[in-house]
Every structure is written in structure tokens, then in C-alpha cells.
Amino acid sequence: MARSDEFQTLRLPTVYRDLPDPEGPEGGRHAHSTAELADTDRIAFMRSYLGELQRATAENVPVRGYFHWSVMDNFEWIAAYSNRYGLYYVDFETQARTPKLSAGYFSELARANAVV
């Protein structure tokens, strides 16, 4: 059985790759792209992170819960609307919400109560 001091809290860096111009080609009035909805990097991160969390709980490390940031794209003080962290894509002009692939994956996780 593992001891809880064998696990450490990690502060992971945020990695940004090929960020689009936040205003977009039409000055911010463009529809979301398929790439913005197919957030496979986020799914890989969630699978890895939550897999380790699941392993820790299986080894009796006290975990009180998990909170995913963020359910929807939102305004971030440091980056305004340019970074999209949410499980749901938000069109900030119309306020329409579209689930990303990660929303479906998170739904599967919750339903199974396990990493899938």
C-alpha cells in the first residue's frame, strides 16, 4: 500500500500551440472551427491526470474531489477571451454553446465513475 507522502502536488505549465488571432479573420465574428471542438490534447491530459488521481485513490490517498476548470469558455483576466479552457465552446457574440469532444469524454468519465 502506498503512503500519501509518495504522491506530490504538481503545478503543470499551460502550453499554448498555434493560437489563432483572438479577433479572427472577420474581426471576431467567425464561427468556431472543427479544430476548436476536437480538443484531443485536453482529453489526453484529462485521461492522464485523472488516471493518476484514480491510482492514488486506489492506494488510499485521501482525495476529497475533483473540479474541472472550466465547463465553458470564459473571460480570463490575463488573456481576455483568447484562451478557451472550457468543455463547451462559447460563441461570445451569440452566447451559443457547443460541446467539444472533451465534454463527451468528461460525461463518460462521470457516468462510469472511472477513467475510460
Image: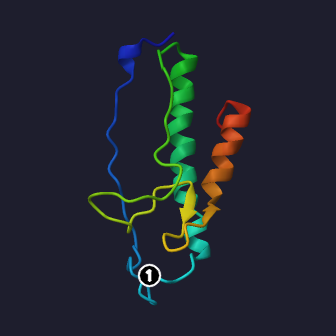
* Total number of numbered discs in the rendering: 1
Coloured how? Answer: rainbow
Q: In this view of the protein, can residue 116 be seen by the observer?
A: no
Quarter location, residue 94: bottom right
- In the image, 69 versus 115, the foreground residue is 69
Circle 1 packing at 10 Å, graded few (<14), some (14-19), many (20+), is few
The amino acid type found where label 1 is placed reads Gly
x then y, percent, for residue 29: 49, 83
Q: Is 21 situated above or below 44?
A: below
x then y, percent, for residue 41: 52, 58
Quarter location, residue 111: top right
Q: Is residue 2 left or right of residue 33?
A: left
* Residue furthest to the bottom: 26
Q: Secondary structure at mark 1?
A: loop
Q: Residue at x 32, y 40 (%)?
A: 11
Q: Is residue 65 left or right of residue 4?
A: right
* Residue furthest to the left: 78
- In the image, 4 versus 100, the foreground residue is 100
Q: In this view of the protein, can residue 112 be seen by the observer?
A: yes
* Residue furthest to the front: 94
Quadrant of the image for the C terminus?
Answer: top right
Q: Is 77 situated above or below 110?
A: below
Q: Is residue 93 left or right of residue 14?
A: right
Name the residue that disc number 1 marks.
28
x then y, percent, for residue 7: 39, 23
Q: Residue at x 30, y 63 (%)?
A: 79
